[in-house]
Structure formats: structure tokens, C-alpha cells
Amino acid sequence: MIKQEAPPLHHRKRQLVANIPVNKYTKSIASFIILLSFYFLGYFTAPVVVVQPQQINTIQQSTNPPAVVDHNRFSTQCVNPVAPQLVRKTILDRVFNGTSPWLNFPPAHVIPLLRPRRIKGWGSNGAVFETLIREVRPKTIIEVGTFLGASALHMSELTHQLGLNETQILCIDDFRGWPGFKDKFLKDLAMVNGDVLLLQQFMQNVVHEKATESILFMPFSTSSALEKLCEWGVFGDLIEVDAGHDFHSAWSDINKAYKILRPPGGVIFGHDYFTSADNKGVRRAVNLFAKLNNLRVQTHGQHWVIHPAADTT
Ligand SMILES: *[C@@H]1O[C@H](CO)[C@@H](O)[C@H](O)[C@H]1NC(C)=O
Ligand SMILES: *[C@@H]1O[C@H](CO)[C@@H](O)[C@H](O)[C@H]1NC(C)=O
């Protein structure tokens, strides 16, 4: 049936060939008329801007070699920070249309696909979390790269232990992992039509640990979520960056996260400054960022830490 609807290829070809002379002919007449009218309208005598080859050369020379500052231009201006007490409501309204994603979780069809609790993380219990939470006493923590929530849950526990019972932890992750990660780490979790169920298992972990009052999430790419937080005025007192470990992902995440670090006492930190992933990009990105912004990189175990306020006083 389909064959009959579309004319065979050689027919179409012939049609095309037949059309060409007509098109060419009408085209040349049209061009001639346009040219003629331009002439009479005086366009050719008006000072038309003509780019001389020399000018093009000059432009090329001035951008060669490309200035590194061009890659450092994350230009969105963030709006003024909303009050910490409004952070949760802002996210609920903006991301979840005003309805908590924890309501009625897990839905019946997902229950058989999840483990009651399945947590896997890397460096999620490092001492750096307690050190920084004690020091900053954050009202808003933003985590860039969450996976199954190991470090978010660790931070939630710490804030409660320290009596910071109003602290909100905002987890940003697309909850997709990365291509092929399940073969290595989560063979035991279900995959449904290609969906790795990371978001659902993360949510289940948070429900299991009774941390739904202190944890919210944004299930989007780190780049788009950070951009939106900047637009909405959601700032973090403590920001942990631990998402993509290649240079460009880390570079983008650090630069965008830094824009929403609450002044003056905010602290930004991240994992894998010293682990095997270090020279793949994280350490390079952190060092370049610090250098361009006149900041000092401190280290704590495998983590890097930047305290902007400590560097400007
Ligand atoms: C969002 O919430 C409003 C009012 O609460 C409701 O009318 C609307 O249908 C909701 N939209 C979606 C996509 O659920
Ligand atoms: C936080 O804890 C303090 C003391 O434990 C309590 O008085 C206060 O009501 C708590 N606040 C919230 C929001 O739970």
C-alpha cells in the first residue's frame, strides 16, 4: 500500500528534472526585476556596508587564541535570595505544582519493583559533612549529584543530631545514573522498559529513613536545575557538587552552583578531588575556578572545599 502512495524514485527524479528549467527561468526573471528595482531605488549608490576581507582577518586575529574568560561567562544574574523558610514552598510550587511528591509514595505499581532500602554511595559518610554542617549551620543545603541519596541522608541525620531541624536539603540529579552503570553497581534493582528506577529507589530510601520533611529533589539535569534556582532566588548556605566528573560537567556545575551560594558565609565543596577520578576533570575544574575567582581551595579527605568569605576577609 505504501509503495503505491509514494511514486517510485525514478518517477520523482524525472519530475524534479522537469521542474528545474522552469524554476531557473522564473528565478532569473525575479532576480533581474529585484536587481533592477534596487538599482532604481538607489541601493547600489547608497553606502552599503561591505565586509572587506581585511576586516574579517582582523576579527579572526583578535579572538585568536580564544580567551579563557569566554568559557567562564555564566552570565545569568540571579534574583535576590528568597528567605530560607520559603525554599521548600518555592520548590513545591515551581517544580511540583504545589503538591508534595512524597504524598502517597510509593504508588502500588512501583512497590514490587523497589527494595525497602537500597543505598550505594561514594565517600558519602566522609567527616567533611559533619565539619561543614557544624561550621556553617546551614538552613539550605543544595546537593548537586545525589544518586540514591546516601550523602543527602547522611546530612539529614547530621542536621537533626545538631538540632538544625529546619534545614532543607535540596537534591539535584536527573536520577538516570550514566550509561551502563547498572552492570557494575545495581544489578539487583529492576529496570522497566529501560527506566533504571533510580528516582523511585532514592525516594523510597528517603521515606525509609523518615527524612521526607527535610529532603526535596529536582529530577532534572544539574545544569538546567541550577539555572532555575538562580532564576527563582533559591540559594544554598552549603552546596555539595558531586555530579558529572568529566572536566566540562564539573566546570559547569561548579560555576553555576557558585552563583547560588548564599553570601557571606556560604561554603561550596565536592567529592573526588583526590580519588582516581581526580585528573579526569574535577580537580582541574576546581583549580581553574578558584584561580579565576581568586579563591583558595582547601581539602578535607577526598573532598575540596571553598569558603569564599574566609578568602576575602
Ligand atoms: C496544578 O495545580 C492546579 C491547582 O492546584 C490544578 O488546577 C492543575 O490541574 C494542576 N496542574 C497539573 C499539571 O497537575
Ligand atoms: C526544632 O527543635 C526545637 C527543639 O528541639 C523545637 O523547639 C522546635 O519546635 C523544632 N522546630 C521544628 C520546625 O520542628
Image (cartoon, grey):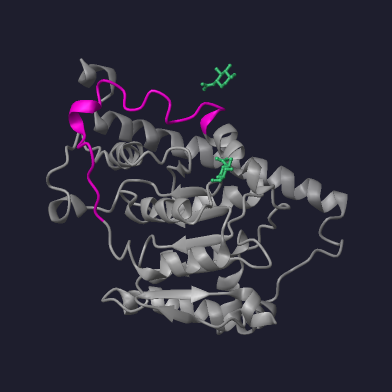
In the picture, measured across the screen, residue 89 lies left or right of residue 304, that is right
* Image position, residue 167 (x, y; %): 54, 49
- How would you classify the magenta stretch by its main secondary structure? loop
Q: Residue at x 43, y 51 (%)?
A: 156
Q: Which residue is drawn at 35% across and 67% down?
A: 245
Q: Which residue is drawn at 58% across and 53% down?
A: 139
What is the quadrant of residue 46 in the picture? Answer: bottom right
What is the quadrant of residue 127 in the picture? Answer: bottom left
Instruction: Name the image quarter holding the C terminus.
Output: bottom right
* Image position, residue 83 (x, y; %): 69, 47
Q: Which segment is the magenta one? A: 96-120
In the picture, measured across the screen, residue 121 lies left or right of residue 87, that is left
Q: Can residue 180 be seen in this view?
A: no
Q: Is residue 184 above or below residue 71?
A: above
* Image position, residue 227 (x, y; %): 57, 52
The magenta stretch spans residue 28: no
Of 271 and 45, the residue lying toward us: 271
Q: In this view, does 282 lie above or below 206?
A: below
* Image position, residue 233 (x, y; %): 66, 49
- Quarter for ligand 1? top right
